[in-house]
Image (cartoon, helix red, strand yellow):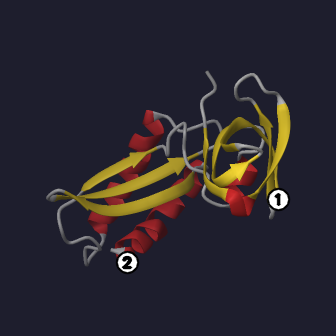
Amino acid sequence: MSNVVETVKQIVQPILDKHAFYLFDVEFVKESKNWYLRVYIDKKGGITIDDCVLVSDELSEKLDEMDPDPIPQQYFLEVSSPGAERPLRNDRELQQAVGEYVHISLYQNLNGQKVFEGFLRSADSDDVIIQNDQWGKNDTIKIPKKMIAKSRLAIKF
């Protein structure tokens, strides 16, 4: 399966470069009896449905032209945005999220809390700093990255 993912990454990258999009992730998974090739794309300002259709059409054409077929079994191709509450999986994604509203879950309590929401003010190799916006608080908190179990963008209501 990883060969399929790596092959698709190589094929889709020139398409994304041409349109100033970037690759968020590629999955090739079996769910029930069907295989799904999922390509998650993004760009500054967010991805539209038209962007997804454009990449899907171009990627599908490239895959159909290849001989031998890199994906011999039947599958469904899905191209989409990683979503408004996408995970922040690494340092680069945290850096790109500076200024955005985030949700951070910790492995253990920090100042009596395991969950923080607020605006990400900075992210370096060791820590993140957020403007804590939960329960009427409005304080800045420094969170060591080694304590972070999960982080994602969040929608502020």
Q: Residue furthest front?
A: 112
Q: What kind of residue is marked 2? A: Asn
Q: Would residue 121 appear left or right of 1 to someone viewing this image?
A: right
Q: Would residue 24 appear left or right of 31 to someone viewing this image?
A: right
Rate crowding at label 1 as few (under 14), some (14 to 19) or many (20 or more) other CA atoms within 10 Å: few
Rate crowding at label 2 as few (under 14), some (14 to 19) or many (20 or more) other CA atoms within 10 Å: few
Q: Splitting the image into 4 quarters, where does residue 117 fall? A: top right
- Does 56 appear above or below 155? below
- Does 15 appear above or below 118? below
Image quadrant occupied by the C terminus: top right
Residue at the image point whose x is 43% and y is 61% from the top: 26
Q: Would residue 151 appear left or right of 53 to someone viewing this image?
A: right
Q: Would residue 148 appear left or right of 1 to someone viewing this image?
A: right
Residue at the image point whose x is 25% and y is 78% from the top: 68
* Residue 124: assigned label: 1
Q: What kind of residue is marked 1? A: Asp
Image quadrant occupied by the N terminus: bottom left
Residue at the image point whose x is 30% and y is 62% from the top: 29
Q: Please state which of residues 37 and 93 is positioned toward the viewer in this rendering.
A: 93
The residue wearing badge 2 is: 3
- Does 101 appear above or below 148? above
Residue 110, position in %: x, y? 74, 49
- Secondary element type, mark 2: helix
Q: Please state which of residues 44 and 138 is positioned toward the viewer in this rendering.
A: 138
- Secondary element type, mark 1: loop
Residue at the image point whose x is 18% and y is 68% from the top: 73
Do the residues under discs 1 and 2 have CB atoms within 8 angstroms?
no
Question: Disc count in the image?
Answer: 2
* Residue 42: assigned label: none
> Between disc 1 and disc 2, whose residue precedes?
2
Whole-number angstrom distance, CA of label 1 to CA of label 2: 33 Å
